[in-house]
Image (cartoon, rainbow, N blue to C red):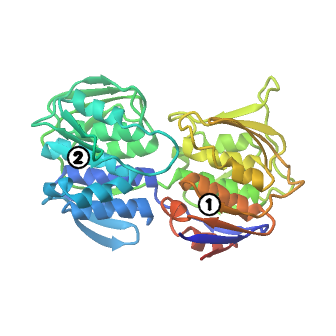
Amino acid sequence: MGTFKIEGGHRLSGEITPQGAKNEALQILCAVLLTPEKVTIHNIPDIVDVNKLILLLEDLGVKIQKKGKGSYTFKADDVNLDYLQSDDFKKDGRGLRGSIMLVGPLLSRFGKGYIPKPGGDKIGRRRLDTHFEGFINLGAKFRYNKEEHFYGVEAKRLKGTYMLLDEASVTGTANIVMAAVLAEGETTIYNAACEPYLQQLCKMLNRMGAKISGIGSNMLTVQGVDQLAGTEHTMLPDMIEIGSWIGLAAMTKSELTIKNVSWKDLGLIPSVFGKLGIQIERREDDIFIPQHKDGYKIQNFIDGSILTIADAPWPGLTPDLLSIILVVSTQARGEVLVHQKMFESRLFFVDKLIDMGAKIILCDPHRATVIGHDFKSTLKSTTMVSPDIRAGVSLLIAALSAKGTSTIHNIEQIDRGYEDIDTRLRAIGARIVRV
């Protein structure tokens, strides 16, 4: 189990460039299975979850060539479908949440798709019903091996239909879209997710020859085509990483420039941090965070009631940033209620922050009230274990702002979502060592 040693209490300075978007990468990489032609993808983050998926594709028989840092070509012209029923696949696919999105492309192009129950973050139940109900609506037959927790769908040819999703699942929408692009006839997906990463997937598929309309809305219409061609695609910067660096700058009272953030795809992120009193300046396509020498003050609502920050499907605030919001609030001036609606276990890391001296009341599995210190007292260093990707980075930010030397174990969770994070943080002045 890897460990970070962090000497906190130091101001940072300089520039940091966000990696390619993890959540986009997991969708885009699965889409290469939809065509036998070459697909070139740029700005792929070098992180554990993405590298696991690339290895899965290679084991499936996809020809992969690395062209440079973050740039790969993929050619799925000789896919080994027998691998899907192997013990190796049942083991390797279980270790990655994003492996579920292999099913839609495989079902669409080859008539069958299988997956073991995927793993990932321990943040509560993350059901797969939306995915498989979508496939069933398109005409697939579903089967489930309860002993092995192994799912399967099969169909000679999928047929387009109208469907109303029971939840605006990002991965569910992506999976259904990838299944529908080669289906016969028209598919309408209502209550579809419309996150920028899902928009990126749809635009890429259209360049490959798909016919998808309604991109960016919650109703997608897909006209099925017989085949797709190759293409070239560049992924967006990771909005979760951008939010993490905004929070880091504020908590450490650092002056920081975040490069090439794709402002138009950030949605509510800048304004939500603004409600916490954090100054954010737009400089072309960069974010500049000035040094908050006098701290930052949380706004109340207009009627004077306590500010509530909650997650919601896009264009609402992504749930992946609520852990960062919570940590940053511990040194704000004022109070805030953080309401995590989508996952019931994501706030269970607050006990570590309380141990560090934070004033947090965990109301229930979904809500926490934070009373900010206003930097009148600093967080104390401690020893922690990272429970998931986002909580792990939140604890890292807390440690960088704390007085003394902190230890974070199980940093493999952080490495799943953040590329070479210790090296990049040292480049802006952080005192962090990987043990």
Where is residue 206 drawn, in percent x and y?
A: 27, 43
* Left/right of residue 262 with respect to residue 157 in the rendered view: right
Q: Quadrant of residue 292?
A: bottom right
Where is residue 412 drawn, in percent x and y?
A: 51, 64
The residue depicted at 56 percent of the width and 64 percent of the height is: 410
Q: Nearer the viewer, residue 279 or 56?
A: 56
Does residue 396 sit above or below 165 in this rendering?
Answer: below
Does residue 136 sit above or below 434 in this rendering?
Answer: above
Q: Nearer the viewer, residue 242 or 231?
A: 242
Question: Around disc 1, counting alpha carbons within 10 Å, would you say few (fewer than 14), some (14 to 19), or many (20 or more)?
Answer: some
Q: Which residue is mark 2?
A: 114
Q: Which mark is residue 385?
A: 1
- The residue furthest left is 156
Quarter occupied by the C terminus: bottom right
Residue 423 visible from this viewpoint: yes
Where is residue 231 drawn, in percent x and y?
A: 25, 55
Q: Nearer the viewer, residue 417 or 409?
A: 409
Where is residue 164 drawn, in percent x and y?
A: 34, 23
Quick one: SS at disc 2? strand
* Left/right of residue 53 with respect to residue 63 in the rendered view: right
Distance Cα–Cα, label 1 vs label 2: 34 Å
The residue depicted at 41 percent of the width and 30 percent of the height is: 217
Q: Quadrant of residue 276?
A: top right
The residue depicted at 31 percent of the width and 41 percent of the height is: 175
* Left/right of residue 322 with respect to residue 368 in the rendered view: left
Q: Amino acid at mark 2?
A: Tyr
Q: Quadrant of residue 253?
A: bottom right
